[in-house]
Amino acid sequence: QHIIDTHPAWIGNLDGIPAQDRHAANMVWLSVMKARIDKQVEDHEPKTIVVHGSLGSRHVVKTVQYQNLLDRQAEIHAFYDQFNSPESDKETYRHTLLVLDDSGDHFRAAVGSGNIDTSDHVMVFTPGMTSTVDATLIGQGSTTWGSGVRDTDNTLDEARRQLAAQGRDDESVAGVTWLGYDAPNWEETLSNDDSSVLRQDEAREGAASLSSFYNGLQATHHGDPHLDSSGHSYGSVVNGLALQQTDVADELEVHGSPGPGSADASDMGLLPDHMAEASAAKDTVAFSGAHGRPPQ
């Protein structure tokens, strides 16, 4: 508890730490981040510049640096508001903050749904191209979570229904929406730089972090969980490359995937018939094969 209170950044993103301790540390660190960004916004100068237009017009606009600070401030405040709002009594899953990293150009985070360390079945979902912390994780403050977290919660609800239908309603489920990498956007893709969705640079960097996250989940779990790895679009590339660096996952499911890096279950440390793929009939990304053949 002393480390959580005094040095939360030491363990908030440290794999192999129990989920509840990571959440507690990240909540302390989130308050520190909020105070820090507020001070940076207040102290930043110059906040505006004068731009001279045609016919002698003059416009006062925010500097790029100041606008970037405001954008980051909005993200941090949204996270703070979301996690400091009481969850509805109807919420099936208590949400936890398992990754919180604002050290780079992109905000990185992961949100847990349910008890990650004790549930019988744990899914880790990695969103794909154009995913952002604000839209995919945070959502609209206290009113609703982001699209990725909602997808995870809906999947867990369906898993519970299927378990109940099989007479296995004593088995518990939990999930993580993991955005601990820089998901490519359209601008990066069209410019075909190292962050393009056509390249694997971001996927390889993300895979190293994700494989470590998987190993940490396995280490802190009470018993051996049934661990399902799920990825959408470019997130499936991250997941596929991550599974080639660890052997703790039991299943791989990809949808809208340009290829998870390999279609061979043994490359992923999986048993045969433990990989699945889903795609829409006209999904050009899924049929592109840009990063390998999808599971059959």
Image (cartoon, helix red, strand yellow):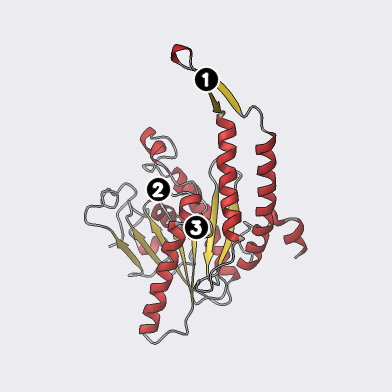
**What is the residue that sits farthest to the bottom in this orientation?**
167
The residue shown at (47%, 85%) is 170
Q: Position of residue 79 (x, y in %)?
A: 57, 54
Residue beneath the point at 42% across and 35% down: 193
Identify the residue under disc 1: 51
Q: Which residue is mark 3?
A: 178
Quarter holding the C terminus? bottom left
Label 3 sits on what residue type? Trp
- Between the residue at mark 3 and the residue at mark 2, the CA separation in whole angstroms equals 13 Å
The mark that comes first in sequence, 3 or 2, is 2
Above-or-below relation of 54 to 271:
above
Dot 1 alpha-carbon crowd within 10 angstroms: few under 14, some 14 to 19, many 20 or more: few
Instruction: Please provide percent x and percent y for residue 139.
Output: 48, 55
> Viewed as shown, does residue 138 lie left or right of 18?
left
The amino acid beneath tag 1 is Val
Closer to us: 182 or 194: 182
Query: Compared with residue 54, is residue 97 higher up or lower down, i.e. above or below?
Result: below
Q: Nearer the viewer, mark 2 or mark 1?
A: 1
Q: Are marks 2 and 1 in contact (CB under 8 Å)?
A: no
Q: Which mark is residue 161?
A: none
Residue drawn 78% across and 63% down?
2
Query: How many labels were placed on the picture?
Result: 3
| Residue ID for mark 2 | 129
Q: Classify mark 1: helix, strand or loop.
A: strand
Residue 208 in the image: state x and y as whole percent.
52, 52
